Image (cartoon, rainbow, N blue to C red):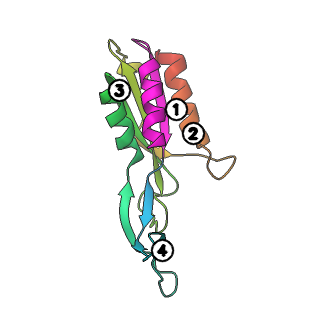
């Protein structure tokens, strides 16, 4: 709930013709079971097995908030952690780089012709945005807007 509220605040304040760029990694939610006292705990599994009960698509939450607040999706890119065909067990191996605007907003695709899928680049700390993703977002804001 806090994430959706934060998005609503950002989109509500976004001025016409201005852009907001988000870097969001999906979350693989591990299966849980309900205890008698109402507390939740993870299922007990043998070995390194992980049971996923849900994929939380945070870029979809961004899109829903944008629509609630009269904004539109301008572009979406996928930043890969490794090779596109690499296996990922516990966490997704990609992040979404998504750009939104409040209408009226337009941009010339000739000035922002980039791959849809690209390597995210070096991360300076574990939960950081990749440097290639950062540069792509900055390039859009600098050269196109």
Q: Earlier in the sequence, mark 4 or mark 2?
A: 4
Locate residue 7: give its quadrant: top left
Residue visible at 62% across and 45% down in the picture:
128
Q: Position of residue 122 (x, y in %)?
A: 64, 47
Label 4: how many residues lie within 10 Å, few (<14), some (14-19) or many (20+)? few
Circle 4 — which element?
strand
Q: Is residue 131 left or right of residue 62?
A: right
Q: Along the line of sight, which residue is nearer the eye, 37 or 4?
A: 37
Residue visible at 39% across and 11% down in the picture:
16
Q: Earlier in the sequence, mark 1 or mark 4?
A: 4
Q: Which residue is mark 1?
A: 136
Q: Along the line of sight, which residue is nearer the eye, 67 or 112?
A: 67
Asked whether residue 57 is drawn in magenta, I would say no
Marks 1/3 in contact by CB < 8 Å: the verdict is no
Q: Is residue 105 visible?
A: yes
Q: Which residue is mark 3?
A: 74
Marks 1/2 in contact by CB < 8 Å: the verdict is yes
Frontmost of labels 1 and 4 is 4
Magenta extent: 1-24
Asked whether residue 18 is drawn in magenta, I would say yes
Give how far apart the Cα atoms at labels 1 and 3 are.
Answer: 14 Å
Q: Which residue is mark 2?
A: 132
Q: Is residue 93 left or right of residue 74?
A: right
Q: Which residue is mark 4?
A: 42
Give how far apart the Cα atoms at labels 4 and 2 are.
Answer: 35 Å
Circle 3 — which element?
strand
């Amino acid at each position: 709930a806090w994430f959706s509220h934060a998005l609503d605040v950002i989109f509500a304040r976004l001025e016409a013709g201005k852009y907001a760029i988000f870097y969001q990694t999906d979350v693989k939610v591990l299966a849980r079971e309900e205890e008698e006292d109402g507390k939740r705990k993870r299922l007990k599994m043998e070995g390194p097995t992980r049971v996923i009960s849900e994929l939380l698509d945070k870029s979809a939450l961004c899109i829903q908030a944008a629509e609630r607040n009269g904004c539109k999706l301008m572009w979406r890119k996928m930043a890969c952690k490794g090779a596109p065909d690499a296996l990922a067990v516990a966490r997704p191996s990609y992040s979404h780089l998504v750009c939104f605007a409040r209408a009226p907003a337009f941009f010339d695709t000739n000035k922002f012709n980039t791959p849809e899928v690209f390597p995210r680049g070096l991360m300076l700390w574990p939960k950081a945005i990749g440097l290639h993703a950062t540069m792509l977002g900055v390039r859009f804001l600098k050269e196109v807007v």
